[in-house]
Image (spheres, helix red, strand yellow):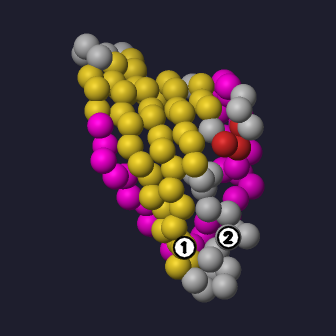
Amino acid sequence: MTCFEPEALGNLIEGMDFHKFYFDNTEHAGQKIHTTLLNPNVHLMGDEGACIAYIRLTQFIDKNGDARSRQAQETRVWHKRNGRGWVCVHVHRTGAPSSVTTADCHF
């Protein structure tokens, strides 16, 4: 998988190691987080390809107990691979980071 996203500071990221760092070092237990995908637009590219663009709205309670929202615009490219089903092969995101960290949230 490849991606462009704010955390990568304008660099094209390849593979999952970059993302694994965030998954392994962010605690989500007990957080109240709600994600909504707005205005999804899907383009099928034959039988084995698809592209979806949407607005991702993430709602959470911050460390002060206040309700907050973050918005990001995302595009994802999917490839249907034999034996693996649909696999995301590229992500492009602008706007807010995709994850809400423990520093942002109230427990």
Give the quadrant of residue 29.
bottom right
Answer whether residue 62 is magenta in the image.
Answer: no
The number of numbered discs placed on residues in the rendered structure image is 2
Answer whether residue 34 is magenta in the image.
Answer: yes
Residue at image location 36% in from the left, 27% down from the top = 51
The residue nearer to you, when weighing 38 against 15, is 38
Q: Are marks 2 and 1 in contact (CB under 8 Å)?
A: yes
| Residue under label 2 | 104
Q: Secondary structure at mark 2?
A: loop
Q: Amino acid at mark 2?
A: Asp
Residue at image location 58% in from the left, 83% down from the top = 66
Q: Amino acid at mark 1?
A: Arg
| Residue under label 1 | 68
The residue nearer to you, when weighing 88 against 98, is 98
Q: Which residues are magenta?
A: 12-41
Q: Residues within 10 Å of mark 2 (few under 14, many from 20)?
A: some
